[in-house]
Structures are given as structure tokens and as C-alpha cells.
């Protein structure tokens, strides 16, 4: 994968990588209802999946890792950075084509409003920019 191609149209590369993403299903989840399909590594001494026998389910391994250029990219083509205060926005001002912000959960409503306003001034994309901004009306 060349860097020129990635810079030209990064979203195409991302969509192709996410389409190739393999779903790993837990062994015997199709056989027993009590065994949920979310992946768990088999630990049995005679487990055919653990021994990687032919014809059995694949286990997650390093070969399923995404290419380095598109790792940690969101579907919009940007990488995510957590924001705790207004000062965290200044490094993102020049990198707003590559990174987007996500306001941390611990940030209160007053600081959240200030962060959203400053991000609009700097042209920074916020993933949760409208979360917890509406004040509750007391009845």
C-alpha cells in the first residue's frame, strides 16, 4: 500500500480494511445456547481449535492486524484524541485534517460548552460535541 494512494483517498482504504475484518466466534457457540458467540480463547487439553487442527475455527492472531497506515482510523478517516480541557485543543488546530477530538466523560457541562465553542473557532471536528450540552428544565 503506497502513501500516495493513501493520501489521495484514505476512506477507500479504510472501507476495504473494515470489510475484510473477520468475526471470531466462540467454539461450540452454535451447538449450545448457554455458550455465547463472543470470542473466548479455548484452554482445553484436547481442544481442536487450540491445537489449530485443519477444518476448525480460526483463532485471532497477529496475521489479522490492519496495515499500519490505517490502524486506529475512524470511518471518517481521522484519528481520535481525548480532550480534557481547552488547552488540549491547541495542538489539534494545525492537525485538524488528521485528528478529531472526543471530550472525555469526566468533563462537566460548563467546561464542555467552552471546549465546543473553542473547537468551532479552530475548525476541529468533535465526535461528541453535542453530548450533555442541553440543560435540564426544572418543573
Image (tube, rainbow, N blue to C red):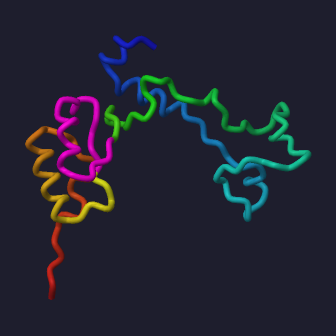
Exactly how many numbered labels are in the figure?
Answer: 0
Q: Is residue 32 above or below residue 65?
A: below
- The residue that appears at 73% across and 60% down in the rendered structure is 35
**Quadrant of the image occupied by residue 100:** top left
The x and y percentages for residue 21 are: 55, 34
- Report the magenta residues as a range: 81-102
86 inside magenta stretch: yes
**Quadrant of the image occupied by residue 10:** top left
114 inside magenta stretch: no
The x and y percentages for residue 18 are: 48, 33
- On screen, residue 49 versus residue 85, left or right, reads right
The x and y percentages for residue 7 are: 31, 17
Can you name the residue that lies furthest to the bottom here? 139
- On screen, residue 18 versus residue 57, left or right, reads left
- The residue that appears at 14% across and 59% down in the rendered structure is 113
- The residue that appears at 19% across and 46% down in the rendered structure is 87
Amino acid at each position: 500500500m503506497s502513501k500516495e494512494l493513501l493520501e489521495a483517498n484514505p476512506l477507500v482504504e479504510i472501507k476495504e480494511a473494515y470489510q475484510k475484518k473477520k468475526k471470531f466466534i466462540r467454539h461450540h457457540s452454535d451447538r449450545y445456547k448457554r455458550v455465547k458467540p463472543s470470542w473466548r480463547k479455548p484452554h482445553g487439553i484436547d481442544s481442536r481449535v487450540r491445537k489449530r487442527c485443519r477444518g476448525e475455527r480460526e483463532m485471532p492472531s497477529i496475521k489479522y492486524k490492519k496495515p499500519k497506515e490505517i490502524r486506529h482510523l475512524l470511518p471518517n478517516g481521522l484519528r481520535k484524541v481525548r480532550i480534557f480541557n481547552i488547552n488540549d485543543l491547541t495542538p489539534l488546530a494545525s492537525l485538524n485534517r488528521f485528528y478529531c477530538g472526543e471530550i472525555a466523560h469526566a468533563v462537566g457541562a460548563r467546561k464542555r460548552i467552552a471546549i465546543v465553542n473553542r473547537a468551532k473557532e479552530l475548525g476541529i471536528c468533535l465526535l461528541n460535541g453535542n453530548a450533555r450540552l442541553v440543560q435540564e428544565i426544572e418543573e
